Image: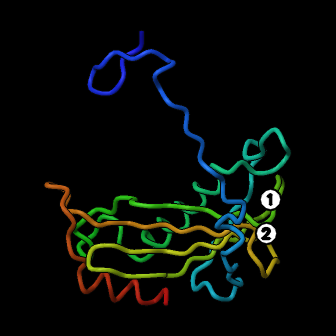
Amino acid sequence: MPHGFCGKRTSVEDVPIRFKTINMNSSTSKVRPCARDEYFYHIQITTRWMDNDLYGHVNNVIYYSWIDTVVNQWLIENGLLKSDKNPSIGWVAHSECNYFSPIAYPSPVVLGLKLAHMGNSSVHYDVGIFVQGALQPSAQGKFVHVYVDPLNHRPMPLSQAFKHTLETLI
């Protein structure tokens, strides 16, 4: 017999099966796609052959890689990754992606970045993923960094210099 909660022995017959109702009005249908000109920073990347999945379009995990890439590229270009302006380290606390239309290899892709929210120790970014030349995104992501002390891993307030630089994304 398999073990249940707290080591209590149960049989398979003793475990109730619960079904969760799936909401067919997914969050994707409620997300308003942001136009390309609503993003304040852009970089271009190129899809790779290995990005495509069995269905002939870019696999969903690649979109998360692109979201991470545009955020960190902006941080590097602005001297905020491991610098005096930013003595804390950013940990990813949340990420999500909503898909509107597929992208496939070969396609140049433009990633757009804007600041969605700046807290005391957290930064929320919005990312648009566009096929080159498109004004509406193929996908749109959210990315949240919580900045922590590198030694004790406790949230740490953002420095004024860091906040000032972030304001360029508004």
Q: Tell me which label, 2 or 1, sits earlier in the chain.
A: 1
Residue drawn at 39 percent across, 17 percent down: 10
Colour scheme in the image?
Answer: rainbow
Please state if 1 lies on the left or on the right of 44 as rendered: left
**Residue at 47% of width from left, 26% of height from top?**
15
CB-based contact (under 8 Å), mark 2 and mark 1: yes
What x and y, as percent, mark residue 75? 43, 71
Please give the residue where the numbered disc 1 appears in the rendered image: 103
Picture disc at residue 62:
none
Observer-nearest residue: 95 or 164?
A: 95
* Front-most of residues 66 and 143: 143
Query: At x 32% / y 66%, what residue is drawn?
Result: 146
Quarter holding the N terminus is: top left
The amino acid sitting under disc 1 is Ile
Q: Give the x, y percent position of residue 79.
A: 37, 74
Q: Secondary structure at mark 1?
A: loop
Image position, residue 139 (x, y; %): 70, 67
* Residue corresponding to mark 2: 131
Q: Which three-letter amino acid code belongs to the residue tagged 2? A: Val
What percent of the width, then of the height, locates residue 4? 36, 23
Q: Residue at x 78, y 64 (%)?
A: 108
Count neighbours of disc 1 (C-alpha within 10 A) and say few if under 14, some if 14 to 19, many if 20 or more: many
Label 2 element class: strand
Binning the other alpha carbons within 10 Å of mark 2 as few (below 14), some (14 to 19) or many (20 upward) gives: many
Q: Relative to residue 41, is residue 5 drawn left or right?
A: left
